[in-house]
Amino acid sequence: MFLLKEIPDKKAIKAAAGDDKNVDASSVSSVLGILKASSDMLVEIEKFFSENNLSLSRYTALSLLSSHPEGLFPYELADYMGISRATASSIIKGLETAGYVGTVKSGDDRRMKKITATKEGLAIYASLVSRFYALLNSLFGSYDKKDIKSVNIVMKTISERVQNYKNNS
């Protein structure tokens, strides 16, 4: 997480970059602003889930499992969430301990087990989803449709550039 209370201004960014022509202070300032805003939101989101005895990652897993009633293999859950299998295993164990997920044997291979949300897991997910969306709406605020469309375009473009960067590294 990005935990600076204040981000450097453009003048400080320019000074730090020196003569590097590949650094545009306005772009760097914008990215630092996005990181700070995202980090601030994540702190509040994690607080919300903590108050409800969950975490964002466990909620995300329950969300995925609620939309896959047939269950998911642990590796599929990891792939959907974009996390390692070891991290997914830890999330699954926490959800199992809470009674929110269980396992069922796969019809194809009896050795493979799928993870499914329990009745309790589906109930906790259903009880939180609307309040979570209301929190997100509250944190984002109200803007006109044109501004929201612009934000969505910028964020999608950033995500695509990150993906290209990862693929070319």
Image (cartoon, rainbow, N blue to C red):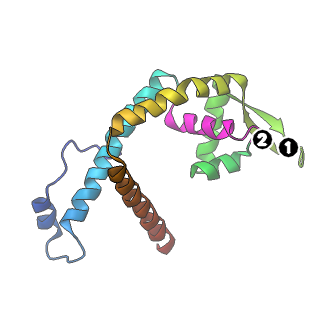
Indicate the position of residue 17 as horizontal and vertical percent values.
17, 69
Dot 2, crowdedness within 10 Å: few (<14), some or many (≥20)? some
Residue 70 in magenta stretch: yes
Residue pictured at 61% horizontal, 31% vertical: 94
**In the displayed structure, does residue 116 sit left or right of residue 150?**
right
**In-front residue for pair 111/123:** 123
Vertical placement of 88 versus 29: above or below?
Answer: above
Q: Amino acid at mark 2?
A: Lys
Residue pictured at 23% horizontal, 71% vertical: 23
Dot 1, crowdedness within 10 Å: few (<14), some or many (≥20)? some
Indicate the position of residue 57 as horizontal and vertical percent values.
53, 38
Vertical placement of 155 versus 123: above or below?
Answer: below
Indicate the position of residue 148 as horizontal and vertical percent values.
36, 50
Vertical placement of 100 versus 69: above or below?
Answer: above
What main secondary structure does the magenta stretch of the protein show? Answer: helix
Which numbered dot is residue 114?
Answer: 2
Query: Do residues under tags 2 and 1 come within 8 Å of each other at their CB atoms?
Result: yes
Picture mark count? 2
For the residue labelled by badge 1, is the local secondary structure a helix, a strand or a loop? loop
Vertical placement of 154 versus 46: above or below?
Answer: below
Q: Which residue is mark 1?
A: 106
Residue 92 in magenta stretch: no
Q: Amino acid at mark 1?
A: Ser
Q: Which residues are magenta?
A: 55-71
Query: Which quadrant is the N terminus positioned in?
Result: top left
Comes first in the chain, label 2 or label 1 = 1
* Distance from the alpha carbon under mark 2 to that under mark 1: 6 Å
